[in-house]
Amino acid sequence: MKLFAMCLLVSIVLAFKPVLAPRKLVADKTKSTVTYSMVHPMHKWDGVSHDVNAAMIYDEATKQIQNVAVAIRVATFDSQNQNRDSHMIEVLEGLKYPNVTFSSQDVKTNPDGSLTANGKLTFHNVTKPVSVKVTRRDVNGQMVMDGKFDLKLTDYGIERPSLLGLATEDQFSLAFSLAFK
């Protein structure tokens, strides 16, 4: 009889055990950045945005990311040179196309533990498929996603900025570090 009562109690406890459902995680803006890096024949520079809006749907049971979305306003990038930042907003038509966005509903775990997010990047009102390799690490109770990928300005209909008659390289890189609570 005691065995029956014990089995019944365990069955009841297991029946009411909370199921881990996928949940929305939002990036911590105080610890998240997106950085662009460009090269001109005379110098190189980075522009950093600390105003990153990012969210993901994370499945606690499987420890998998189901989808992710990121949006950054062009005007939030700071290259430590106000004239250059103003010129970049002008070149990128930041008033007409204020945001750069990425979204993916196809995030896979690779054998080496890294992730690959296959999604769409919209930049200068042009949307193109992009595949991004991402490393995931835990830092002080936060899940941090890091990655970097290259783009070409001309692929997005953007004229290369120039200084003293010399244009920047067409290719530039975007790097990110997104911290989720």
Image (tube, rainbow, N blue to C red):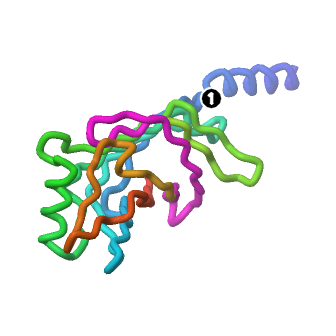
Residue 172 vertical placement versus 103 (above, below): below
- Where residue 146 sits in the image (x, y, percent)? 51, 59
- Where residue 109 sits in the image (x, y, percent)? 68, 43
Residue 124 vertical placement versus 135 (above, below): above
Quarter of the image for the N terminus: give it. Answer: top right
Q: Is residue 124 magenta?
A: yes
Residue 117 horizontal side relative to residue 9, left or right: left
- Where residue 10 sits in the image (x, y, percent)? 75, 27
Q: Is residue 138 magenta?
A: yes
In the image, 73 versus 122, the foreground residue is: 122
Q: Name the residue located 88 percent from the left edge and 25 percent from the top edge.
A: 3
Look at mark 1 in the image and give the residue it sits on. Answer: 17
Q: Name the residue located 18 percent from the left edge and 69 percent from the top edge.
A: 84
Q: Is residue 135 visible?
A: yes
Q: Amino acid at mark 1?
A: Lys
Q: Secondary structure at mark 1?
A: loop
Question: Image quadrant of residue 89?
Answer: bottom left
Label 1: how many residues lie within 10 Å, few (<14), some (14-19) or many (20+)? few
Q: Name the residue located 50 percent from the left edge and 58 percent from the top edge.
A: 148
Q: Is residue 32 visible?
A: no
- Where residue 99 sits in the image (x, y, percent)? 24, 43
Magenta span: 120-147
